[in-house]
Image: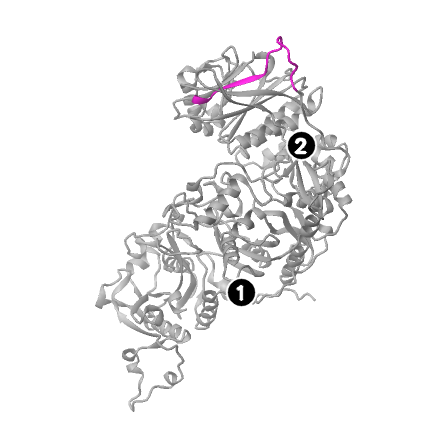
């Protein structure tokens, strides 16, 4: 969420009203912004860990109270004090929403026509679009100027996606000669004094300038934008009729056209790769700062011509659009969506509070219902659908005034079968004195493979891990349990330390389908348990396998059960009462028969084999158990012999 | 990315789709196949709108939608369930869903944040639901876990409109704190799925770790989740009960 920092005093001046902190917090809550922090420049510097200012320098900072206000990510009109105070005043009813006018230039040969010619064949290779506007007779104070720059920064960070989608350039019109040109030229042919070097008046060729920005510490704030154009054979450039470089988008403006507190006429250009966003950005800057023009809320347009190399105009438009449109929302729809029943007339008033006025009630010929027709101003580019209008009416009405209801349709609840089984087994295994753990799904290659004496095989690998602990999604639950053991050394192992987890692992799988989609991986629910103690506990872990099978209604096969007959040929007591599903049998097979898993102690591991109707009555291996190899224990710093088990639970569903 | 972002009407240029916030997959890097006709409807909605919306009007890129990632919210699964609900045999029927599951975010870690955590999500899909229904459902839900005083604040999510942040007076902390997020799914999300026009879906969600840490006075998330949890804490944990509310 973007944050706007405003001095409390200045904000209350703009609002023409004072509030206590609590009252203002309340207003923000109702409106839909959040007063996140109350601080001051000095306090920030004191709290900051990165700030290296001396005590003297910190004392010199202002201790005026600053409000940090979080605004919704889709409200570009709330990113500066001008916009926020205006929106709040309209919400409170102390101000009417302004009407923006694009003043058409008088047809006169003597006044230079505001035109931007785009050399399309060049710009389309790197940054195709541009939109422009002129603010006339504007008065800047230091505060307004700072706010003007801050708004551009905010927009660059958010909507413009770090200048990749749109970049804003603002210029002192009186230092320039129209008509203007937007071109893209070879880097070494663009020569100018950039804004960063105004004081020394150093001129650079564009390619040298970018190299400079990459290494110079004083300009490090521009370094992130260099890659946007660095490798292009042509760099975008905005020029006036005298070939003065106005800007090198999206990097830096030229020094010649820089804006000062004395500037009275401003030329704004927004170059872009996304034309829709460019217009939203331009409209926002104009809407916010045209209030300081001698004729407030007016703007002068610029004609943008896309021309061929032969100077032929291929297409053309006039900006800023100051996009205003009307939108219809059925009155009944709004009432029903919110769950209120207010009169259409009250809706009109609520619309005005939310900058959606003037609003009218409309009857359509072929339709019995009444429609609300609202005016969507250029400051409300977030309105996409009638639901956006309904939400605003709800906000103006007050969310906390809505009467609550419960949906009336009856439905029957239930758990997913795999989860139901997992929960039941968790209870039972805990009853067998195993302590449950919940471990991370992301781990290092080492933990998941090499520490278990396994080669690195297929898995889901992350491309941007925060650190090596997050290289891969686990394909086994065992490392999580072993790391838990490692961190609980102070616990008592004398009577055996038993842990288990039932959770998902993730395998690479390019056939598994989920909602008609094949992503290339699938989740698998595993059970993993271990025993660590003075003895290895192999028979204890083995016992858990048998227990789980009994609980899941799977019976041991004839060969396995042979040992359970008494000498007189009868089944022993427990076997008599076993309940199992028809066709479901299991057995244990020592791994020496069939290639040992190097994770286990040689000769001390076994496979769990399952036969079921789901496996077409073939035996499949659903897991293994055994005594862990000492090297594995060493890798996890475990000092006690340990046996472990891991099974695929899904096969038991 | 497809189920996690695009059908939820989260634009491809949204910052949450950055590598800063999301874990992208190196291998397997791209989704192999998706339901193509649904993909087309989602693409059209982003590019041109429809069903009363003006859309986002940008160029929707297939490669972006096909980038594999670790889901950043359980809504990535809710979208799949709603799609199935809309296209099941016999057509749509009102339904209530919930999930409690793991999500992954590439965020800065600190005492209360890890790269993976759990979300609790609930949704109701039915005809003509309203914000009043959402508020009532949320109140009933939180009453069950001991929070009875709630206030709702206008908020923004790309996939819900209206959206509300849920604030509750926490009986233990003795102060108002944000306890969840909620909203009504946008028509731009529901229409391409094929849900009937007057079906509305209300949804709310919260993290699992935060209320647990508040209730049990746990200061560091690593004491609750992961391999650094002390087994002694697990062994002495009480049964989970809340103050009875009548």
Mark linked to residue A83: 2
Mark linked to residue B237: 1
* Image-quadrant location for residue A155: top right
Give coordinates of residue A337: x percent, y percent.
Answer: 67, 51
Say which quadrant the N terminus of chain A sits in.
top right
Residue B14 vs residue A544: left or right? right
Could you classify mark 2 by the number of other residues whose Cα lies within 10 Å: few (under 14), some (14-19), or many (20 or more)? many
Give coordinates of residue A69: x percent, y percent.
Answer: 64, 38
Q: Looking at the image, which residue sits at the far front?
A: A366
* Image-quadrant location for residue A584: bottom left
Residue A513 vs residue A131: left or right? left
Vertical placement of residue A30 versus A441, above or below: above
Mark 1 touches mark 2? (CB < 8 Å) = no
Q: Is residue A105 magenta?
A: yes
User: Numbered disc 2: what chain?
Assistant: A
Start-end of magenta stretch: A104-122
Do the residues at pointers 1 and 2 share their chain? no
């Amino acid at each position: 969420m973007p944050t706007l920092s405003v001095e409390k005093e200045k904000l209350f001046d703009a609002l023409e009203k004072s509030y206590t902190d609590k009252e203002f917090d309340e207003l923000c809550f109702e409106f839909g912004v959040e007063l996140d922090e109350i601080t001051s420049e000095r306090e920030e510097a004191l709290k900051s860990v990165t700030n290296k200012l001396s005590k003297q320098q910190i004392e010199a900072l202002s201790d005026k109270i600053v409000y940090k206000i979080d605004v919704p990510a889709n409200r570009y009109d709330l990113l500066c004090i001008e916009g926020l105070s205006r929106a709040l005043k309209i919400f409170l009813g102390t101000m009417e929403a302004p009407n923006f006018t694009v003043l058409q230039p008088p047809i006169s040969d003597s006044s230079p026509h505001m035109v931007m010619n785009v050399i399309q064949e060049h710009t389309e290779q790197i940054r195709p679009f541009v939109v422009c506007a002129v603010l006339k007779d504007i008065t800047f104070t230091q505060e307004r100027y700072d706010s003007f720059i801050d708004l551009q920064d905010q927009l660059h960070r958010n909507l413009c996606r770090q200048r990749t989608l749109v970049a804003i350039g603002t210029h002192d019109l009186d230092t320039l000669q129209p008509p203007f040109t937007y071109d893209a030229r070879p880097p070494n042919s663009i020569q100018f004094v950039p804004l960063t070097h105004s004081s020394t008046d150093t001129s650079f060729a564009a390619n040298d300038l970018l190299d400079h920005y990459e290494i110079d510490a004083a300009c490090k704030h521009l370094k992130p934008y260099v890659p946007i154009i660095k490798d292009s054979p042509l760099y975008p450039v905005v020029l006036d009729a005298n070939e003065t470089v106005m800007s090198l988008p999206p990097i830096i403006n030229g020094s010649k056209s820089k804006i000062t507190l004395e500037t009275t006429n401003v030329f704004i250009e927004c170059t872009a790769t996304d034309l829709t966003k460019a217009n939203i950005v331009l409209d926002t800057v104009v809407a916010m700062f045209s209030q300081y023009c001698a004729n407030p809320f007016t703007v002068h347009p610029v004609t943008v011509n896309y021309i061929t190399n032969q100077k032929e105009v291929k297409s053309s438009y006039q900006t800023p659009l100051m996009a205003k449109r009307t939108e219809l929302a059925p009155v009944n729809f709004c009432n029903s969506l919110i769950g209120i029943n207010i009169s259409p007339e009250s809706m009109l008033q609520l619309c005005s509070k939310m900058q959606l006025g003037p609003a009218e009630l409309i009857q359509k010929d072929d339709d019995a219902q009444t429609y609300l027709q609202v005016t969507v101003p250029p400051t409300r580019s977030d309105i996409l659908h009638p639901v956006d209008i309904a939400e605003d009416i709800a906000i103006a009405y007050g969310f906390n005034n809505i009467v609550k209801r419960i949906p009336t349709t009856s439905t029957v609840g239930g758990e997913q079968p795999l989860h139901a089984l997992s929960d039941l087994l968790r209870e039972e295994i805990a009853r067998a004195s195993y302590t449950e753990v919940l471990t991370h799904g992301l781990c290092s290659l080492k933990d998941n493979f090499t520490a278990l004496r396994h080669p690195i095989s297929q898995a889901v690998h992350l491309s941007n891990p925060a650190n090596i602990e997050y290289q891969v999604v686990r394909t086994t639950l065992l490392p999580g349990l072993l790391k838990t053991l490692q961190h609980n050394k102070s616990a008592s192992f004398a009577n055996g330390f038993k842990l288990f987890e039932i959770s998902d692992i993730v395998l690479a799988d390019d056939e598994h389908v989920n909602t008609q989609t094949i992503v290339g991986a699938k989740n698998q629910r595993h059970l993993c348990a271990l025993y660590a103690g003075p003895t290895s506990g192999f028979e204890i872990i083995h016992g858990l396998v048998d227990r789980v099978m009994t609980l899941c209604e799977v019976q041991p096969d004839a060969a396995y059960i042979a040992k359970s007959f008494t000498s007189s040929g009868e089944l022993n007591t427990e076997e008599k009462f076993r309940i199992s599903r028809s066709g479901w049998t299991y057995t244990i097979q020592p791994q020496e028969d069939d290639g040992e898993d190097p994770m286990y102690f040689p000769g001390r591991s076994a496979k769990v084999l399952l036969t079921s109707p789901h496996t077409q009555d073939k035996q499949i291996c659903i897991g293994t158990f055994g005594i862990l190899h000492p090297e594995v224990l060493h890798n996890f710093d475990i000092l006690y012999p340990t046996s472990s088990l891991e099974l695929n639970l899904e096969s038991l569903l | 990315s497809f189920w996690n972002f695009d059908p939820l009407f989260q634009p491809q240029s949204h910052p949450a789709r950055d590598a800063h916030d999301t874990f992208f997959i190196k291998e397997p890097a791209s989704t192999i196949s998706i339901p193509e006709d649904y993909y087309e409807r989602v693409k059209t909605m982003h590019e041109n709108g429809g069903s009363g919306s003006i859309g986002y009007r940008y160029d929707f890129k297939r490669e972006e939608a096909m980038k594999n990632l670790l889901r950043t919210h359980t809504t990535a699964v809710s979208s799949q369930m709603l799609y199935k609900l809309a296209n099941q045999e016999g057509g749509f029927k009102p339904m209530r869903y919930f999930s409690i599951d793991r999500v992954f975010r590439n965020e800065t870690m600190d005492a209360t944040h890890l790269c993976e955590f759990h979300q609790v999500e609930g949704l109701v899909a039915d005809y003509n639901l309203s914000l009043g229904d959402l508020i009532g459902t949320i109140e009933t839900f939180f009453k069950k876990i001991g929070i009875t005083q709630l206030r709702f604040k206008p908020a923004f999510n790309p996939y819900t409109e209206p959206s509300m942040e849920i604030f509750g007076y926490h009986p233990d902390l003795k102060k108002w704190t944000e306890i969840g997020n909620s909203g009504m799914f946008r028509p731009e999300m529901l229409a391409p799925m094929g849900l009937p026009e007057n079906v509305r879906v209300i949804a709310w969600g919260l993290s699992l770790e935060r209320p647990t840490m508040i209730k049990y006075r746990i200061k560091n998330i690593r004491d609750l989740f992961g391999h650094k949890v002390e087994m002694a804490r697990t062994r002495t944990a009480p049964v989970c009960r809340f103050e009875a509310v009548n």
